[in-house]
Image (cartoon, grey):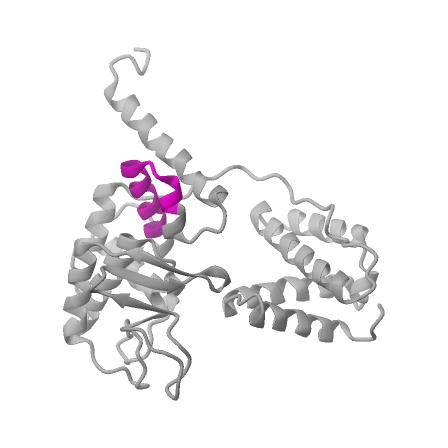
Amino acid sequence: MSETRSNADWLAAYLSQLSSQRKLSPHSVAAYRRDLLELARFGDGLAWDALGVGEIRRYTSKLHAGGLNPRSIARKLSSWRGFFDWLGRQSALAANPAAGVRAPKRAKTLPKALSVDDAVRLAATPSRLHGAPLPAELCNRAMFELLYSSGLRVAELCGLDRQHRPAGAHGPASLGWIDAAAGEVVVTGKGGKMRKVPVGAAALAALAAWLAVRPAPADGGAALFLSTRGSRISPRLVQLRLKAHGQAIGIPVNVHPHVLRHSFASHVLQSSGDLRAVQEMLGHASITSTQVYTSLDFQHLALAYDKAHPRAKIK
């Protein structure tokens, strides 16, 4: 390389660039770090510019033989390609060793979405948490309604403030907030991109009920959703609460926040047929990411056909 730096130095510089310039979330930066540290360990001390296509192929084969699914391998390869592309712009790297390596083929899977009835039941049915005070129940109801109403990612939900707060003495500017008067939620999604998404009447009513009893945050902050200790709620706690709620009311599948996001997208597309609108509301950078829901919509139509058409099946 044209500049003498250790593997650790190059890695630290790259992760800093992901965070400061590309505005990736701490979760995404941590995932890049894990993927690149794994590659460094496999390289057993080789400098980044000494890793070639052969090493990348061997490690990819090792991951596949170890049972890692093709989707995870593809994600790691994407992390490595991005790093070596950046490294090539910073140094005299001859070529990107991961550029021509492909992950094993994977079966095409569709996102799991609930039926309309199950999604509405999950969002609207109150459930009592054992030993928890009433505010926690109202907090859950507001969170679940909002996840389904607006198709938010769980990190976007947890990052919401009660209202917009500019940067100042109390900390950085809000990443997201509720604008009840406009009937919308503003969130910061992947890549630091902000978007506005409509909020339905049921979710607005649930939010109003929660805000009426919401205690002051323990840290004096502006977080919209709080744990029972008064701190900003975490994605993991939302996952646990939603899973417990789904089990309590008899939803027949394992429910997690992304299931409600998938359900939101599928149900809006079924009703409107407007793929571009769904793309904007989900915050997808590419329409390709949203097109998977057209396959899900066709599955729904095919199922309805099989159930209803007298000549759908040979008797």
Residue 130 on image: x %, y % = 19, 69
Is 259 in front, or is 173? 173
Q: Residue sitting at 33 percent across and 77 percent down?
A: 165
Query: Is residue 267 magenta-colored?
Result: yes
Q: Relative to residue 240, is residue 137 drawn left or right?
A: left
Q: Residue sitting at 28 percent across and 80 percent down?
A: 230
Is 67 placed above or below 301 here?
below
Give the position of the C terminus as an image quadrant. Answer: top left
Task: Please identify the residue farthest to the bottom as the structure is shown.
Answer: 169
Is 192 placed above or below 59 here?
below
Q: Which image quadrant for residue 90?
A: bottom right
Query: Is residue 271 magenta-colored?
Result: yes
Residue 308 on image: x %, y % = 24, 21
Q: Residue sitting at 42 percent across and 54 percent down?
A: 283
Residue 210 on image: x %, y % = 18, 69
Q: Which image quadrant for residue 226?
A: bottom left
Is 101 in front, or is 185? 185
Q: Relative to residue 134, is residue 229 drawn left or right?
A: right
Q: Main secondary structure of the magenta part?
A: helix
Q: Relative to residue 14, is residue 148 drawn left or right?
A: left
Residue 82 on image: x %, y % = 66, 58
Question: How many numbered circles does the render carry?
Answer: 0
Magenta residues, as a range?
259-278
Can residue 77 be seen by looking at this rendering? yes
Q: Residue sitting at 32 percent across and 15 percent down?
A: 313
Can residue 67 be seen by looking at this rendering? no
Is 88 in front, or is 36? 88
Give the position of the N terminus as an image quadrant. Answer: bottom right
Q: Relative to residue 183, is residue 168 drawn left or right?
A: right
Is 6 placed above or below 153 here?
below
Q: Which image quadrant for residue 118?
A: top left
